[in-house]
Image (cartoon, rainbow, N blue to C red):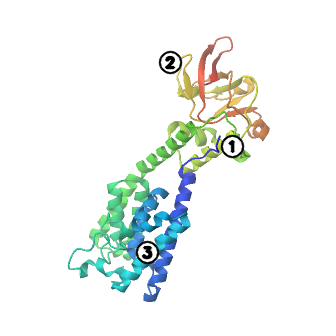
């Protein structure tokens, strides 16, 4: 089985951001070089900044498509470095042509509305690097980029667009000399915009955490939890889960998976723990025990059905000794004793020092996303019986 991977932003997002930063720095360096003869820099060409502000937060695929719309010749690039180089050459050529035909402060002359007797071309060379979906910012208006960011957010609200809008509005406020230097009408508008951002951010962040948790659960669902991956398990993340001193097992690892509410840090930790367990040896032994305040998969006594399979979205802690497991889950409104008669995915973390981390619980830990079949209630042993489905 292949190594466990996820497209979660904890991994893929970092790679996309690095590619975005590399392209932005290369384009800015090119503009700085070409405009140096006029004692100007890339900061004097707002269309470059506007293009990158628009696409900040895009995945690599969407960013490549946008870059190729501007520089179609880059489609044959053999790698990322060559693609960036070809886009940069297209930017360089566009700058030279437009500066040669007349410009002010690095802005192509044909884009200056005040000088144009007719509407400007639909897709000028530097307007968002060939993307003609937005109007060019009004000349010398410090709030032009912020207004463009606001329009993009209102058309398709998401957290990344809101953060870009906030950043652009703060930058515009500073460019204009600060809040007190603004006319009263602009002050009221800026205040209203920030208030809207504050209102919108909470539900957007909640939805972002929900989306992230769904993605993690989806990635976990495709795994064969009984398979063992090659590699050295990360004992530190196992310690974080099993050690009573951290208190992370439920609130940090399991609750996000059950409630679909995971921060980026939690999503990364969950995936790290899953990888560590899949690299750990499968426990070979007899039945396992679990004391808990809730039944597997969130089932209730009213809905439990013999023969039905229940999926546990989170990680599942068990012990090889009933006497130890009986102490688990005490203090809850309800307390259940669970016996797992047969299994194939429980991980032996005792051999990794997990017993030391877990305070002598002789723990066997199941990866997230395992399924268990309900066998019924044993009156003789006073426990609910399962086997791994």
The answer to which quarter of the image holds residue 151 is bottom left
Give percent across and percent down for residue 224.
62, 35
Give percent across and percent down for residue 228.
70, 38
Left or right of 284? Residue 227 is: left
Q: Nearer the viewer, mark 2 or mark 1?
A: 1
Q: Secondary structure at mark 3?
A: helix
The answer to which quarter of the image holds residue 79 is bottom right
The residue pinned by badge 1 equals: 276
The residue pinned by badge 3 equals: 91
The answer to which quarter of the image holds residue 282 is top right
Q: How many marks?
A: 3
Ranked by sequence position, the earlier of labels 2 and 3 is: 3
Give percent across and percent down for residue 284.
76, 28
The residue pinned by badge 2 equals: 302
Give the Cα separation between the discs numbered 3 and 1: 46 Å
Left or right of 249? Residue 36 is: left
């Amino acid at each position: 089985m292949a190594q466990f991977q996820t497209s979660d932003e904890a991994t893929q997002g970092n790679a996309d951001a690095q590619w975005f930063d590399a392209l932005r720095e290369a384009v800015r360096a090119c503009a700085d070089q070409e405009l140096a003869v006029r004692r100007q820099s890339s900061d004097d060409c707002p269309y470059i900044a506007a293009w990158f502000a628009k696409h900040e937060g895009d995945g690599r695929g969407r960013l490549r498509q946008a870059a190729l719309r501007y520089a179609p010749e880059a489609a044959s690039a053999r790698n990322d470095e060559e693609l960036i180089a070809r886009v940069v050459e297209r930017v360089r050529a566009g700058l030279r042509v437009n500066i040669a035909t007349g410009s002010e402060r690095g802005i192509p002359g044909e884009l200056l509305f005040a000088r144009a007797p007719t509407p400007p071309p639909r897709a000028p060379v530097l307007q968002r690097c060939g993307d003609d979906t937005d109007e060019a910012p009004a000349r010398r208006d410090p709030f032009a980029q912020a207004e463009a960011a606001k329009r993009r957010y209102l058309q398709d609200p998401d957290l990344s667009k809101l953060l870009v809008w906030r950043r652009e509005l703060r930058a515009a406020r500073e460019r204009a000399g600060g809040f007190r230097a603004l006319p009263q009408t602009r002050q009221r508008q800026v205040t209203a915009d920030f208030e809207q951002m504050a209102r919108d951010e909470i539900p957007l962040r909640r939805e972002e955490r929900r989306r992230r948790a769904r993605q993690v659960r989806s990635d976990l669902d495709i795994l064969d939890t009984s398979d063992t991956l090659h590699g050295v398990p990360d004992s530190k993340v196992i310690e974080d889960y099993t050690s009573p001193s951290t208190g992370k097992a439920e609130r940090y690892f399991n609750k996000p998976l059950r409630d679909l509410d995971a921060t980026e840090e939690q999503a990364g930790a969950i995936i790290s723990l899953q990888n560590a367990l899949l690299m750990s040896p499968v426990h070979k032994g007899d039945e396992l025990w679990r004391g808990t305040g809730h039944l597997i998969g969130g089932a209730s006594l009213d809905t439990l059905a013999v023969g039905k399979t229940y999926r546990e979205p989170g990680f599942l802690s068990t012990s090889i000794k009933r006497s130890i497991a009986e102490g688990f889950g005490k203090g809850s409104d309800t307390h259940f004793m669970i016996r797992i008669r047969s299994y194939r995915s429980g991980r032996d973390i005792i051999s990794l020092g997990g017993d030391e981390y877990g305070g002598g619980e002789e723990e066997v830990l199941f990866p997230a996303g395992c399924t268990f079949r309900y066998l019924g209630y044993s009156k003789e042993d006073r426990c609910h019986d399962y086997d791994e489905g």
